[in-house]
Amino acid sequence: MGFREALDSGRFVVTAEVGPVKGTETKELLEDAELIKEKVDAINVTDLQSSVMRLGSMAVCHLLVDHGVDPVFQMTCRDRNRLALQSDLLSAWVLGVRNVLALTGDHPTLGDHPDAKPVFDLDSVSLLKVIGRLNEGFDMAGNELKGSPDFLPGAVVNPGADNEAALEMQIIKMEKKIEAGAKFFQTQGIFDLDLFERFMKRVEGFRVPVLGGIILLKSAGMARFMNKNVAGVFVPEPLIKEMEATKDKVRTSVGIAAHLVKGMKDLCRGVHIMAIGWEKRVPMVLEEAGL
Amino acid sequence: MVVAEIKPFEEIKNSIREFKKVLLVGCGTCVTVCLSGGRKQVELLASALKMSRNLEGDEVIIGEKVLPRQCDPKFVDMIKDEAGQYEAVLSMGCGAGVQGIADIITDIPVLPALNTTFIGMADEKGRYLEVCAACGNCILAETGGICPVARCAKGLIHGPCGGSQRGLCEVSKDNPCVWQMIYERLVKLNKVDFLKKMSRQRKIPVRPRRLVREEPKPKKEPTKGA
Ligand code: SF4
Ligand code: SF4
């Protein structure tokens, strides 16, 4: 069953995420994918995450297709203008990619080529519209396509925006993304289920599946770093303490993640697990969460 | 106004190194206001250049002029003859000013003494902020008078990117996320609905742009008996 069918089936869905390396090495990534592919409905491939130059998302998505995985092609507006975005979408389709996650993208200054020209010709909302147009058989300029894709477009939302205005704008933008054609949402990493529940209440009426984001904590230091530097991620102090005190970091991390997954079962339509290098531990999380 | 800053002194000095007679021209408009190319800065730069070259035993004559606007041919015409006595013009105007002079004074080099940075305004802390990118398609009516094209690091027009923390931009913690400012202003104006409606596509202008102003037709004398 592919990702689209899993979403349509109404059951709780699980997606994971892999990040290509800087270079041409794909062995480990494909091993990880093999290991988790039976347990998840789709695997996202990040697009030059954090504006760091790496192997591209489209090529890795294609490799995943060959390995029997239904990939989610993450596409940011940072590096490509509308010509390249549309062309890459068509290319991805002919390479077997069926799902696209439309993102604005981080600014290049945050990555390892800070002087790169930021493109942002389109943004997440207009990219979603473009995907919809391509699906209908037309490009952005209204020209007819000879053969068209049928992508499942998705988007992200950040339920942990750290002040009222930011959260309101996230919700307004989520509505705009739905209007522009988003058929599913994956969220930023969540550590506070109460906060997430409040968010889900707010967006209940939107009727678009939301997959709650789960980040595997690797250490207390990582948690503190994210609290300081990653927008919308907030790891509560007790969890940090737990990571600090533990003798078995993997066990504790998996335990925390599994608890969050369980909690989300009643709140949303699925989970999106960002293991950030710990992909091999994703099956443990799912098992402990009873999935 | 157009905001500019003076280039590093060594760079300016190097650019005129081969010349013995240079006409230094300030501009009385934007760069006077942002304290980078007005009369005062012309005087200071002229004396610094002369002093520095004197110390090296390589004297230079620097003529000083300030035009009301360098980007207007009728003012540049005022210095056209005088410029004939010099080997180069050093302009303390913005990029348009330098080119306004170079368009008319074509037989000697016209050099920039400023780095033109942006269209901006001064805030109460005495800083200049970029506030308009001259996008040619103004959306300020929908954004509470605060421009996301110029003031969002990504130029986003459909709302914020999700990267802001504590109301600050992900790109520079010195800057507020402009979408936060827009939201707060729209709340105050009771126009948050604008954010939901905005869905236009950003237009990327083809450069160079041109604007033709049609001359107002001279009014006809009312004809008798009409
Ligand atoms: S939208 Fe912004 S950049 Fe465009 S004209 Fe208006 S103020 Fe200038
Ligand atoms: S944080 Fe705000 S100002 Fe900065 S890039 Fe994102 S939306 Fe634009």
Image (cartoon, rainbow, N blue to C red):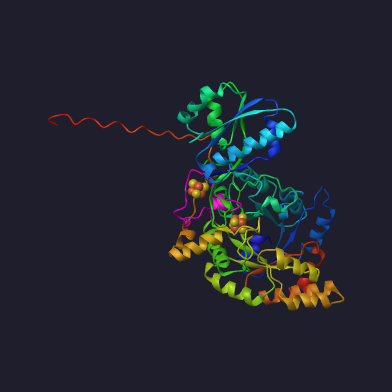
Could you tell me residue A196's position as x and y percent?
A: 63, 73
Place residue A45 in its image quadrant: bottom right
Quarter of the image containing the C terminus of chain B? top left
Q: Does the rendering let one see residue A152?
A: no
At a point 68% along the width and 31% down the height, the residue shown is: B15
Tell me: residue B143, above or below residue B92: below
Tell me residue A288's x, y (percent): 78, 75
Residue B121's spot in the image, x, y percent? 53, 50
Residue A91 visible here: yes
Which residue is at the front of the view, B222 or B90?
A: B90
Residue B152, magenta (yes or no): yes
- Is A59 on the left-hand or right-hand side of A31? left
Q: Could you say where residue A225 lies in the image, as x and y percent from the top left?
A: 75, 66
Quadrant assignment, res A80: top right
In this rendering, is residue B210 above or below A201?
above
Q: How many marks?
A: 0
Q: Nearer the viewer, residue A115 or A248?
A: A115
Q: Which residues are magenta?
A: B131-158
Instruction: Residue at the far left: name it.
Output: B225
The image quadrant of residue A279 is: bottom right
Q: Nearer the viewer, residue A220 or A76?
A: A220
Vertical position of residue A179 compared to residue A92: above or below:
below
What predominant SS class does the magenta segment belong to? loop
Look at the image and say whether residue A64 sits in the magenta stretch: no
Q: Describe residue A287's horizontal placement relative to residue B109 as left or right.
A: right
